[in-house]
Image (tube, rainbow, N blue to C red):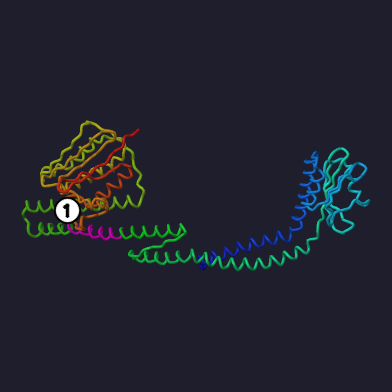
Amino acid sequence: MWKMKNNLKNEILKYFLFFSLFILSLLWIFQILFFNSFYKVQKINDIKLVSEKIKKYKQKENYHEIINDLAFDKGVCIEIINNNYDLLYGSTYFGKGCISNIERTYQYKFDFINDNKEEKTYEIKNPKYHNNTLIQAIKIENNQYAFINTSLEPVDGITSLIHKQLIVISIIILILSYVLANFISNHIAKPIKEINQQAKLLTKGNYQISFPYTSKIQEIEELSNTLTLTNKELNKTDELRRDLMANVSHDLKTPLTMIKAYAEMAKDLHQGKEEKQLQDMNTIIEETDRLTILVNDILELSKMEQVEDNLKQDNFDLIKLIEEILNRYNILKETEKYDFHFIHKEKNLFITADKKKLEQVIYNLLNNAINYTGEDNKVTIRVTKKENILVEITDTGKGIKKEDIPYIWDKYYKNKKKHKRNLIGTGLGLNIVKKILEDHNYPYGVKTKEKKGTTFYFEIPKKD
């Protein structure tokens, strides 16, 4: 069943009020239910503290003054007696609730002296004031005993006053909680709501929006910055998608048109002319091969982007691999007069990598060099071994403009958006190269000079 969700403002308000009610509940519980217990515990701690100081300062010359000061500071009565219950010293402070040294009070003194304990706490009824009194009895030495007593005042009046104060405080806190919760929720919810409204436009394909929000809240500002970056990337992706569709459509249309045209020529114009028909068939085969390369590149790129492609680690001879790849271009040497130079000092150079994918890298870089080399049709492959293995593939073409270099690895990027039909390849090759080299963690790049050619390179790090 569909359930309505609260907005952020109401959620913050709800939790803020719940928290305030929880704190108020604790205050009421502790002040009402446990106030008497806390009061009694505090009184016990006071008289125990006095008893510890009585023992501590027993040998002081001004002992009687110290005892009297303690009695005034803590509001307690102090009596020191001997075994015969004679009063040796009594504090001059004798406030309300203190038990006087009268006969009826001898019972707890008799009990303590005969109990032979070091200290003991009593709670008895004060016969004079009809309230309870706490007494801390301690043994000072063999024939001296101290009794510190303090009154447990009735707290009903104090409790009633606290009740009234709590009612007022509770009302004030709830009002302040509501006001503060509204302020905080508005402070947080308003920018998020505005960001959300802008973000919804992204789902409708509007990439011209912006998220220029600044906030003192770090997460909101980070969200705004993230959506701004996402918007830029989506805009860029959408532009690349349009370019890709236009370029792929062009590359598909051109060979299909030629296949149809040459098939019609072979059927209608060159019927009975075996040599002409053979030429037509060769052209159809070449264009079909071009379509196959295009489809394979698109599928390969799609696979790399959608699925994390695990690398298969092979140990193989890099020199031999490059020689095998170059052999595939013998047809270009014969028909197009291409000049391939493979420069290397090592006869064998074994490496560990994904052989199939590294073969694709070299193949795509060679295709790129073939497509853009100069009038001399010269392509150079150089392998150098120093700390790392450096592979360079160089053409003698017009070079790449400096402002275009950051974009050449993008899918189907074309200078000034003009699509040029390649001799070999699809325009996706460099993006595939980039993905494979990054999967291998191989450094790569390009060096170029206008009208002097371009060198694409990558490094194979030395294995420890």
Q: Residue 415: horizontal and vertical position, in percent? A: 20, 55
Query: What is the crowding at mark 1: few (fewer than 14 residues within 10 Å), some, or many (at least 20)?
Result: some
Q: Residue at x 41, y 67 (%)?
A: 197
Q: Which residues are magenta?
A: 237-254
Q: Nearer the viewer, residue 402 or 354?
A: 402
Q: Quadrant of residue 142?
A: top right
Label total for image: 1
User: Magenta part mainly helix, strand or loop?
Assistant: helix
- Residue name at image x 76 percent, y 50 percent: 46
Q: Nearer the viewer, residue 148 or 407?
A: 148
Looking at the image, residue 350 sits to the left or right of residue 185; the answer is left
Q: Position of residue 411 (x, y in %)?
A: 27, 53
* Amino acid under disc 1: Glu
Determine whether the residue tagged by mark 1 lies in a helix, strand or loop.
Answer: helix
Which residue position is annotated with label 1? 287
**Where is residue 426 drawn, in percent x and y?**
22, 52
Residue depicted at x 36% and y 66%: 204
Residue 106 drawn at (x, y percent): 91, 49
Vertical position of residue 193 compared to residue 152: above or below: below
Is residue 161 within the magenta segment? no
Residue 56 in which image quadrant: top right
- Residue drawn where x is 10% and y is 58% of the image: 265
The image quadrant where one finds the C terminus is top left
